[in-house]
Image: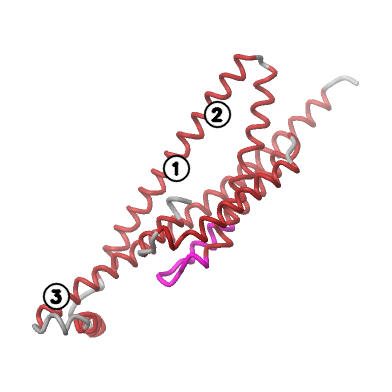
Amino acid sequence: QSVGAIGLFNSIGLQNDQLIPLFTIILAATLAGYLFTACVISPANGPRLHLAALILIAAGAWMDSRVTNLTRPEQFYLSQAMIAFAGAMFLPPALLVGFGKAIARGPMGILSFLVVFLGTQSMGGILASAILGTFQTVREKFHSSVIVEHLTLQDPLVAQRIRAYGAAYSKVLPDPALQNAEGVVALGKLASQEASILAYQDMFLLIFYVALAGIALLAAHTAYVRYRTTRLAALTPA
């Protein structure tokens, strides 16, 4: 969320104090997710909680992928609450199953599990942020090049837009050439912002497709575990 929604609004120009309601909703949804998970968690419910979390993440990412330059934090309240709630649901079942197996192996098993679990969580968070940030930068460069290709002064609409932006400086810059130069700068900034927004659209879609892949893998794994359990039960003598 820090790379996605927060990075998007920072690129638009919103400051952290304007995102306080969004932060508050994310915090409340996270606490609600932990409370809900604490009430229903069990080893048998682990796959169901993971499936529900992945569905919420996929739905939230799909909703966020329709972002535009007119999007404001109010349009992200529901989707980010869903993602925060899902994030709180995802971790406890994994911790429960892994810790249960570690207890059966004694103190060294518990120590090894804690080291591996905490290490993978820290590395996973850093790696995911790096991958998503790199993906957003690459896509921004791509969209920026595509947009710039269509910005030519021979286009009447582009020339009209430059003159309109330059006219805003007419009171401080009487020279028309300087006004046009400022108009070009303003148009370039808007083009860069639009390219950044399109890159964030791609990033949210990437998260959506990754969540769908996670759902498919989880469903396949759950089906395999059930099949193996049924087969072992059939082979075990009565």
* Element marked by disc 3: helix
Q: Which residues are magenta?
A: 59-75
Name which residue type carries label 2. Phe
Residue in the image at 42% along x and 39% along y: 127
The reply to whether dot 1 and dot 2 touch (C-beta < 8 Å) is: no
Where residue 99 appears, as percent x and y from the top left, is 65, 26
Q: How many marks?
A: 3
Q: Identify whether 172 is placed above or below 13.
A: below
Q: Identify whether 15 is placed above or below 187.
A: above
Q: Is residue 187 left or right of residue 31?
A: left
Name which residue type carries label 1. Ala
Residue in the image at 26% along x and 73% along y: 150
Q: Nearer the viewer, residue 85 or 191?
A: 85
Distance between the alpha carbons at the discs numbered 1 and 2 = 16 Å
Q: Is residue 201 left or right of residue 160?
A: right
- What residue is pinned by disc 3? 181
Mark toward the start of the polypeptide (3 vs 2): 2
- What residue is pinned by disc 1? 128
Where residue 181 appears, as percent x and y from the top left, is 14, 75
